[in-house]
Image (cartoon, grey):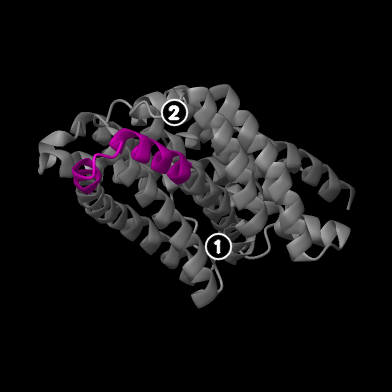
Amino acid sequence: MAYEIIYMVLGIAAAMFIAWNLGANDAANPTNAAVGCGAISLKKALLMFSLFAAVGALVQGYMVMKTIGKGVVKDIDPLGALVASVSAGVWIMFCTWKGMPVSTTHSTIGSVLGIGFAHLILSGKTRIDWTVVFAVILSWITSPLLAIILSISLYFLFGKVALYLLSKRRNVDMFFKGLLVFNLAFSAYAFGVNDVGNATGVYIAVVSKIFGIPDMQTMFILAILGSVGIAFGALTWGYRVINTVGFRITRLDYISAAAAILSNALIVWCFSTIPKFVIGYGMPISTTHASVSSVIGVGIAKVKGLAGVDWKVVGYIVASWILTVPIAAFISISIYTLLTYLIP
């Protein structure tokens, strides 16, 4: 029990570390388009992100948190939870330092899977629920494709709205600026719903077991801790990745930015919410995938072809996504296996 408490305390510290990394890297997802088109300042966008992400985490964060904490790998032990957090956090921090919008979700799931594989290596028994894993992987494939399709559709819809407003001699820029602020708030809310579990989800079973707290209360407490860490990360380092996604993939105006942000928000919220009521687990999709794919979609729509996107930048980003799961898994397998032999 003494070791379990030590692991838990260190684990909560690691969870705050990964929450900071999460806010630093993924603050770009709801805010990049609005900042990139000049509708809102970087400082105001990050403040809005911090506030509404916290609301989403506290209201609906449990939907995806359970998937990470008890779905992918059953009954993660205290040491495993600690190692998963550290492994994911190290990789995310490295990518953030390099300015790469790496998927925090991929990092977390990769690290958790690494713990599952480590158990298989050490004991010959697996705790991985492959049904949940395959559902998560499927959501990773479909969500960016749907985000591209949705953002293209919204771009043309908003274009027609702009023409209508012009015909009525209304202020088009004012309308879309207000829409952008609303979309940013909704997107940040959806981010909080989906991503707070990346920071704290692995500790559900640990905290519930040690303190005898019901899962729902545990998840609410963990959501509070995660929200604080995310806000701190966004306000200190969030600007780094926003500069990549908001300015370098494609040029954004009010209409394309509104389409990209709303597409991102709808995709993230739907994948977090609908599967929870259908199969009992919200899908921890990559909000980075949804965000970047939405920006790619409007880039394609603006020029009605692939030339509207800087594919060199996209390729750089995709490469970091592909590497994330195996690297995070390898880190957690290595650390967990080593510590298991070193610690009595």
**Label 1 Cα neighbours within 10 Å, binned few <14 / some 14-19 / many ≥20:** many
- The answer, for residue 209, to whether it is visible in the render is yes
Answer with left or right where residue 308 lies relative to residue 267: left
Counting from the top left corner in percent of width and height, residue 164 is at 21, 48
Segment colored magenta? 162-184
- Amino acid tagged 2: Ile
Q: Magenta span has 180?
A: yes
Residue at horizontal 36 percent and vertical 35 percent from the top: 174
Magenta stretch: residue 2 in it?
no
Q: Main secondary structure of the magenta part?
A: helix
Within the image, what quadrant is residue 206 found in?
Answer: bottom right
> Residue 89: x percent and y percent?
58, 36
The three-letter amino acid code for the residue at tag 1 is Val
Q: Nearer the viewer, residue 54 or 26?
A: 54
Label pair 2/1, CB-CB below 8 angstroms:
no
**Number of marks in picture:** 2
Residue 339 visible, this orientation = no
Furthest-front residue in this view: 168
The answer to whether residue 80 is above or below residue 25 is below
* Cα distance between the residues tagged 2 and 1: 38 Å
Mark 2 — residue? 40
Vertically, is 170 above or below 115? above
SS class of the residue under badge 2?
loop
| Neighbour tally class for label 2: few under 14, some 14-19, many 20 plus, Cα within 10 Å | some
At horizontal 47% and vertical 57% (from top left) the residue drawn is 269
Q: Earlier in the sequence, mark 2 or mark 1?
A: 2
Residue 186: horizontal and vertical position, in percent? 49, 49
Viewer-nearest residue: 86 or 117? 86
Instruction: Say which element carries label 1.
Output: loop
Q: Residue visible at 35% across and 39% down? A: 176
| Residue position marked by numbered label 1 in the rendering | 72
Q: Quadrant of residue 35?
A: top left
